[in-house]
Image (tube, rainbow, N blue to C red):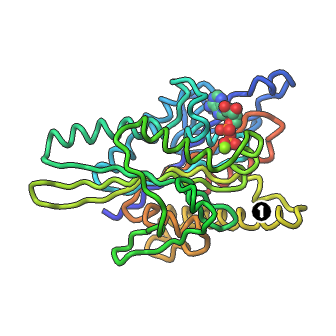
Amino acid sequence: MGEVCVRVAVRIRPLLPKEVLHNHQVCVRVVPDSAQVMLGSDRTFSFDHAFGPTASQDQFYESCVKPLVASLVDGYNATVFAYGQTGSGKTYTLGGGHVASLVEEQSGIIGQVAADLFVLLGERAADVRSAADVRVSYVELYREELRDLLELHTAHRELHIREDDRGNTVVVGARETVITSAEELQSVLEAGNALRHTGPTQMNERSSRSHAIVTVQLTQHNHDDGAVRSSKLHLVDLAGSERAARTGNTGLRLKESVHINTGLLALGNVIRALSDPHRRGNHVPYRDAKITRLLRDSLGGSAHTLMVACVSPSHHNVTETLSVLQFASRAR
Ligand code: ADP
Ligand code: MG
């Protein structure tokens, strides 16, 4: 094994009703029957997958994420992260928003991951004599400080990242909740979201400035030989990429921008180091930011990584879209 596997998908959301109302023009499209995206009329970018505004959550899940759930059950770690400017569809795609307000077919990949995971585990348990437990944790990384979103009493306390002697990354003290169904996962995440912010305006404000990480930890026990196999899948809703570039900020906003910039740059550098064939075996700069330290055992090595670059189709966002497409295409 040890083969590095980083895949990059781009998803272009539809114009929103208010953008249509204000006559926004579409400036980015998927080149038909390809995994390429064209910005304006002459700039193309290539990816592993490209989804246009009519692609459904199911289509996205089936082609990009389902294979990672299967490899999770086979014992491999995986990371899915959504990158893009605020309002580009990261939370919609991951499905970490206010789940209750969404109708069934709009529910994002988190719910589908859980549903599929329990189906696969059921099949496996029937095959080999095994039992599994699934635990979920939900943390937020804001200004390089890590907080637990599942623990009301300690949400104000900073968590620390450690590496155990087998090279596993552990968030010390993060609450892990056992789940036995997809519905349970949804309610755990909703509780976390409630902790993350109060009120819808603050939600968008805050969520654009922090990274939210849902971790599904799977432990499988084989009754025949007593073997225990652990693997995990991280689903990461990154801070808005526009924050990184923003200069003129001062005070708190400047500090936020610097931290976001550090995190997103570090992630880009790690992904590039992993996907560059000439750099294989060379130094991968995981230690440069908390986000890369946290994801370390699930990025590279035998882990599977999917980067989803989300973009708005509107010509008003063309500058951000260009920088996101450049970031994402450099990651391959
Ligand atoms: P982000 O998390 O990147 O800030 P959101 O996920 O909140 O962005 O999406 C912004 C808006 O666009 C929301 O109203 C969301 O429902 C809508 N949206 C995003 N992606 C899609 C999509 N693929 N289809 C329909 N609506 C979408
Ligand atoms: Mg969001």
Tell me where residue 172 appears, x and y as whole percent: 47, 69
Work out which quarter of the rendered image holds the N terminus and state it: bottom left
Disc 1 residue lies near ligand 1 with CB under 8 A: no
* Residue 29 is at least partly visible in this image: no
Relative vertical location of residue 258 with respect to residue 11 in this rendering, above or below: below
Work out which quarter of the rendered image holds the C terminus and state it: bottom right
Left or right: residue 118 compared with residue 86: left
| Closer to us: 302 or 144 | 144
Left or right: residue 200 compared with residue 139: right
Task: State the SS at label 1.
Answer: helix
Left or right: residue 256 compared with residue 8: right
Relative vertical location of residue 154 with respect to residue 305 in this rendering, above or below: below
Q: Quadrant of ligand 1?
A: top right
The residue labelled by disc 1 is 257
Q: Find the residue positioned furthest to the front.
A: 153
Which residue shows up at 24% across the image and 38% down it?
A: 122
Which residue shows up at 83% across the image and 28% down it?
A: 24
Tell me where residue 258 appears, x and y as whole percent: 76, 67
Q: Locate residue 26: give its quadrant.
A: top right
Count of numbered tags: 1
Which residue shows up at 73% across the image and 34% down it?
A: 313
Tell me where residue 142 appears, x and y as whole percent: 67, 61
* Residue 258 is at least partly visible in this image: yes
| Closer to us: 188 or 282 | 188
| Closer to us: 40 or 247 | 247
Tell me where residue 218 appears, x and y as whole percent: 33, 53
**Residue type indicated by callout 1:** Ser
Which residue shows up at 80% across the image and 46% down it?
A: 319
Characterize the local packing of mark 1: few (<14), some (14-19) or many (20 or more) Cα atoms within 10 angstroms.
many
| Closer to us: 238 or 115 | 115
